[in-house]
Image (spheres, rainbow, N blue to C red):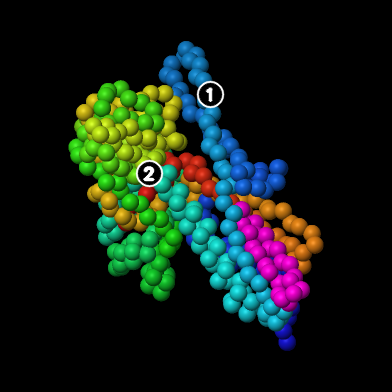
Amino acid sequence: MNTLLTPLMITQEALVVLVNKLNTVKHFTRKYDDRFGEEGAKIGNILNIRKPPRYLTSLGQALALEDATETSIPLVLTQQRQFAMAFSSQELGLQIDDFSKRIVAPAIATLANMVDYDGNGQFINLYNEVGTPGTVPQTRLLYLQAAQRLNEEAAPFEDRVCIMTPAMNTNLVDAQAGLFQASDKIREQYNSGMMGLGLGFQFRLDQNSRNQVVGLLGGTPVVNGANQTGNSIITNGWTASRVVLNAGDVISFGTLTAGSLAVNPQNRQSTGVLRQFVVTGNVSSDVSGNATIPISGPSGFGIVTAGPFQTVTQSPASGATINIQGAASTSSLRGMAFCSDLTFAMGCADLPLFGGLDIAERASSKDLGISLRILRAYDIFEDRAPIRGDFLYGFVTQYPETGVRIAN
C-alpha cells in the first residue's frame, strides 16, 4: 500500500541526504549559526568573529604592562543554493523509500556536493603548503610533514583532519600496506579502500577538492627594498607585462640561512623553515618587471617582525629571492590538513517560511548546524506541485595557521 508523503517526511529525508554528502564541511565549526537568527536570515548577513589577543609576557619582578589587542574576522552568508522540481499527483504517492532514492537523493546530492565544493575553496586562504604541485604524494612522509607544520604553528593535536584527493587516497592506502597495526584497521582499509585513522589524522576522501593554477612566473624575481613589512611586498626582476602570480599561489623569501623564517606564534622562536605566505590576488608585472604582491600569513597578518603578532624572524632583505611553490602554469588539486572545528567556520541560517503554501517546512541538524527549507505549492492548471529546497550559508577561514595545504 502506498504511503503519502507528509511535509516533515520530505524535509527530514532531504536533510539526511544533505548531511551525508558534506564530506569536508562537516568538519567546519558551526557554533555561530544561532547568532544569525537575531536579525533574520538573508544574503549579506555578517558576523564578526572575535579572536583572542596575544601577549609577549615579561621576565622579572618589575611590572610591564601590555596592550590587549583583539582582532576579528567576518563570517558572511554569501551563498544560497537550491534545488527545484515539480511532481505530479501520481509521483507524490510513491513510498518514502522510493521518493528518497529516485527524487530527493539526486537533487540533494548535487546541492550538497556544490556546498562541499564551495567549502573546499577555503584552501586558498591557507598559507602553509607541503609537497610539489603536480606530483601526487607517494609516501607517508608528506603527511607527517603536514603534521610537523601544524606542530610548528602551535596547532592543537586533537581533532586533526586530512582531506585527500582520490589519487592521494590511493597512494596512501598502498603505502600503508604491510605496516604493523591493529588487524581490524588493516581489514577496514582493505575492504573500504579508504585510509581512515592514522598518522595523527582522521583521513577523509573528497572528490570536491579544489584546483590551484600557478601563475605564469617568469624572470628572476627578487625583493625590491629592505625593511618591508605588512600585507604587501614590492618586488622586481619579473618578466615584463604579464600576470606573474595567481591568487592562491604560495611564496617565501630568501634562504634558510638568510631569509624570513617562520616563528612559533606562542614563543616567537624560529621554527627553522622559511615563512610561507599566500598571494591574495592576481599579480601583474609592469613594463619594467616590477610588481607589488599582496600577501597573507598567520591570522591574516603579513610580514610582522616584532610584537605579539610576530610572523617572521626578520624582514626580507633587499635582493632576496622569491620562492614560488610549483612550476609556472602547473594545475593541480590541493588536499588539506587542518584542525576540525577550529580552522574553518561555516555559517548557516534558518530561511523564512511563508503561508499559503502546501508545504512550508524546515529541518535542522543540531549537531552539524545545518538548516534546510522545503517549500511546495500546487499548480491547479497542470496538476503538479512545484517544490524547492534552499540552503543559505557562508564560510570563513578562522585560524589559517592551524591548516596546511597538501599539493597533489
Amino acid type indicated by mark 1: Ala
Helix, strand or loop under label 1? loop
Q: Which mark is residue 68?
A: 1
Q: Secondary structure at mark 2?
A: loop
- The front one of 130 and 177 is 130
Please say whether residue 380 is one of the residues in the magenta stretch: yes
Q: Residue farthest to the left?
A: 220
Image-based side of 11 in relation to 121, left or right: right
Q: Quadrant of residue 203?
A: bottom left
Which residue is identified by label 2?
Answer: 247
- The answer to whether residue 259 is visible is no
Classify 170 as above or below 272.
Answer: below
Closer-to-camera residue (123/111): 111
Image height of 97 relative to 328, above or below:
below
Magenta part mainly helix, strand or loop?
Answer: strand
Q: Position of residue 202 (x, y in %)?
A: 44, 57
- Label 2 amino acid? Ala
**Magenta stretch containing residue 104, yes or no?**
no
Boundaries of the magenta span: 370-392
Side (left or right) of 393 relative to 143: right
